[in-house]
Each structure stands twice: as C-alpha cells, then as structure tokens.
Image: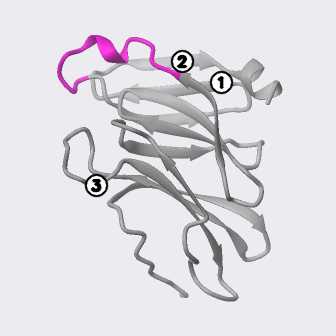
Amino acid sequence: MKRHYHWLGTPGFSVVWIPQGGDEGSVVVGGGGGKVKSGVVNRLIIAPFSWASNPVDNATAIHDTGDDVCLGLVPHPSLPGVICALLRRRVALLRVSEDATAVEELASFTGDFLEAEDESSLQSACWVSPRDLATGGEDGMVRLWRVGGVLEGG
C-alpha cells in the first residue's frame, strides 16, 4: 500500500478528492478552529496531488469560510469540481476551478439552521445527487433541497 502525508497547517475535518485524470488530482481539505476565536482560520485548502511526483504540493487556493468551520465535503456525482460543503449551520455548493486555483460559491442555503441558539442545528451529513441535496443534522432533522436549476446555470 502506498501512502503519503503532508501538513497543510489547519485542523482538517473533511477531505474530498477531485480527480484530474490518471494519478493526478486535487485534495480539498476543510477545517479550522470553529466559531471560537482560537486564531485558527476556518477555510478550505485546495492542493494538487500526484502519486507519480510530489505527494501534495503547496496549496494553490485557499477559500476563507469566515466563522463557519467546514464539517463535511461531498463531491457532486456528475459535475467535476462541484462539491457540497457543510459549513457549520449553512450548506454551500462550490465549484473548484479546473486548474485548482480558485473556488466559486454557486449557492448557499441556511434553511432553519440559525433558529437554534445552541449548536443543536449543526449539519453533520450530506448527500448529493445530480438534482437534489440532502443533509442530516444533530437536531434529528433531514433537510432536502432541489438544486438542479442552480447547477444547470453554472
């Protein structure tokens, strides 16, 4: 079994692989310090990866997520570079550029996540289909969105 390790400088709570053909692609790591002011920035880090050469090169893009730590990342099943990010109490559909140097936010959903004063409405699981998005939260709720129109225009 072949394996590599690389320090990206932030606690990672979620990772997704964006293939670019063969043994190459990009690793997207979501993490940070959370909502507390720990000095650790909440962000997504995108870094190219190749099994044939350097395991993980330096980050080519960093996407600041503000007060929202990224708790989960799920790749879209049919749109390369499109990922769903669970950002504490909101869900974002993001597109990583083909050269992995930029992140574009296609849409963001908050639903009723912000109604709870405590952390009970954190989203902890996500599923993405070509047209729909579902999340499961620590509050026991499953939330569903039809997002096909957002993605068809992007």
Counting residues from the start of the chain, the first of labels 3 and 2 encountered is 3
What residue is shown with label 3?
40
The quadrant where residue 74 appears: top right
Residue at image coords 51%, 46%: 73
56 vs 59, nearest the viewer? 59
Residue at image coords 70%, 88%: 52
Q: Is residue 78 above or below residue 133?
A: below
**Range of magenta residues:** 109-120
The type of residue carrying mark 1 is Asp
Mark 2: give few (<14), some (14-19) or many (20+) Cα within 10 Å. some
Pinpoint residue 119: horizontal percent, then vertical percent.
21, 27
Numbered disc 2: secondary structure:
strand
**Residues at discs 1 and 2 in contact (Cβ within 8 Å):** yes
- Residue 144's mark? 2
User: In 3D space, how far apart are the residues under numbered discs 1 and 3 (Cα atoms)?
Assistant: 33 Å
User: In 3D space, how far apart are the residues under numbered discs 1 and 2 (Cα atoms)?
Assistant: 7 Å
Residue at image coords 79%, 74%: 22
Numbered disc 1: secondary structure:
strand
Q: Nearer the viewer, mark 3 or mark 2?
A: 3
Which of the image's four quarters has the N terminus?
Answer: bottom right
Pinpoint residue 47: horizontal percent, then vertical percent.
58, 67
What residue is shown with label 1?
132
Pinpoint residue 107: horizontal percent, then vertical percent.
62, 26
On whether residue 111 falls in the magenta region, the answer is yes
Q: Is residue 153 above or below residue 25?
A: above
Numbered disc 3: secondary structure:
loop
- Residue 10's mark? none
User: In 3D space, how far apart are the residues under numbered discs 3 and 2 (Cα atoms)?
Assistant: 31 Å
Q: Main secondary structure of the magenta part?
A: loop
Counting residues from the start of the chain, the first of labels 1 and 2 encountered is 1
Pinpoint residue 27: horizontal percent, then vertical percent.
58, 64
